[in-house]
Amino acid sequence: MPKRMITLIYPQALIKEPVIYRLSQTFKLIPNVRRARVTEQTGEVMLELDGEEDALNRGIAYLAGLGIRVEPTPEKGC
């Protein structure tokens, strides 16, 4: 299965929402949180996703559609 390492930067309105859970359930992706920093104002999560290539692309588009900034992250950044 392909893997993708991404960093998610959450807007304040989504910090308390179960976004990663919904992503994994809806698109059948396996998330692995590699690093996270969450405050009352912002959230930043480095996430490794495993899944089919099409599901990865659709899942990332879903996150972006919610208003989450999605940035590719090199594997060595962990």
Image: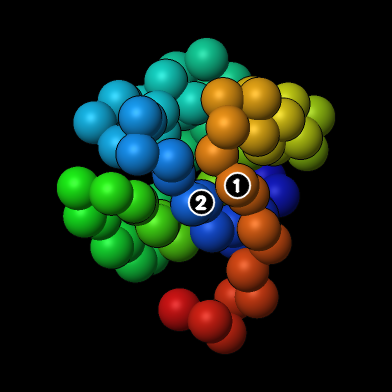
Badge 1 density bin: few <14, some 14–19, many ≥20, Cα 10 Å: some
The disc placed on residue 69 is 1
Amino acid at pointer 1: Arg
Spot occupied by residue 23 in the image (x, y as percentages of width and height): 49, 26
Dot 1: what SS? Answer: strand
**In this picture, is 4 found above or below 51?**
below
Residue 34 lies left or right of residue 71; in this view the side is: left
Determine whether, in the image, residue 6 is placed left or right of residue 46. Answer: right
At horizontal 40% and vertical 57% (from top left) the residue drawn is 44
Q: Amino acid at mark 2?
A: Leu
Compared with 37, 10 (above or below) is above
Residue 23 visible within the image: yes
Is disc 2 surrounded by few (<14), some (14 to 19) or many (20+) residues within 10 Å? many
Per the model, the C-alpha gap separating discs 2 and 1 is: 6 Å
Could you tell which of marks 2 and 1 lies nearer the N-terminus? Answer: 2
**In the shown orientation, is residue 65 left or right of residue 39?**
right
- In the rendered image, the vertical position of residue 25 relative to residue 1, given as above or below: above
Tag 2 secondary structure: strand
**Residue for point 57% across, 84% down:** 76
Residue 16 percent coordinates (x, y) = 24, 31
Residue under circle 2?
Answer: 8
Q: Is residue 69 left or right of residue 14?
A: right
Viewport quadrant of the C terminus? bottom left
Position in image of residue 42 (x %, y %):
34, 51
- Answer whether residue 55 is visible to the viewer in this image: no
